[in-house]
Amino acid sequence: MSHHKCFYCEQSTKQTRHEVDHYIDVAEDPTRAFTWTNLYLSCWECNHQKQPNRAIPVTDCLDPCAPDAQPSRHLMFETELIRAREGSAQGLATIKKYRLDRKDLDHKRMKQLHLFNEALIRIKDALIADGRKDMNENEMAVLRSFCQPDFPFSLMFQAYLERHRP
């Protein structure tokens, strides 16, 4: 369901410590302890470093599993740095609650951006070599692959491609 990514920060959980988080804390509502829709895959850092609900309630944040969440309306990226879009209160609360602006996440997002940049350079070189102005469908598919749900930090790449769409 999560494509082996943390529901909050979107880093891959395949090579990192991870666990199941209770979206609504058991201490807050014990009746939801074993409710499937209250169990989210989380990296250890997001689960253990998040702010408690008494400090920042989950109702003030984006719910990554809500069908109408639309994170790109509340979050944006400047290079690898996550920001609240236009000062969105929900975006700010989400970043603060789950500490999405941690240095380790900035570093991991930067590594993924490096891979994206390498793909762009290969595409640019092919365009120049072939004397083309526009990317072909295969080249567009390479860039869209970074936005696939199973790709780490796919939201960041969706935001980049939306912002830089011709």
Image: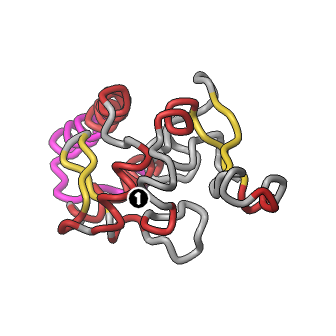
**Where does residue 86 sit, x and y in percent of width and height?**
18, 68
**Where does residue 22 sit, x and y in percent of width and height?**
68, 50
The residue lying at 20 percent from left, 36 percent from top is 125
Quarter location, residue 5 = top right
Relative depth, front residue between 147 and 104: 104
Residue type at mark 1?
Glu
**Where does residue 130 sit, x and y in percent of width and height?**
21, 45
**Where does residue 156 sit, x and y in percent of width and height?**
35, 50
For label 1, count other residues whose C-alpha is less than 10 Å away and answer few (under 14), some (14-19) or many (20+): few
Residue matched to label 1: 137
Report whether 146 appears left or right of 131.
Answer: right
Magenta stretch holds residue 128: yes
Q: Quadrant of the C terminus?
A: bottom left
Report whether 108 appears left or right of 32.
Answer: left
The residue lying at 48 percent from left, 55 percent from top is 54
Magenta residues (range): 119-141
Q: Secondary structure at mark 1?
A: helix
Relative depth, front residue between 49 and 137: 49
* Dominant secondary structure, magenta: helix
The residue lying at 68 percent from left, 34 percent from top is 19
Magenta stretch holds residue 162: no
Quarter location, residue 136 = bottom left
Report whether 33 appears left or right of 113.
Answer: right
The residue lying at 30 percent from left, 36 percent from top is 113
Quarter location, residue 160 = bottom left
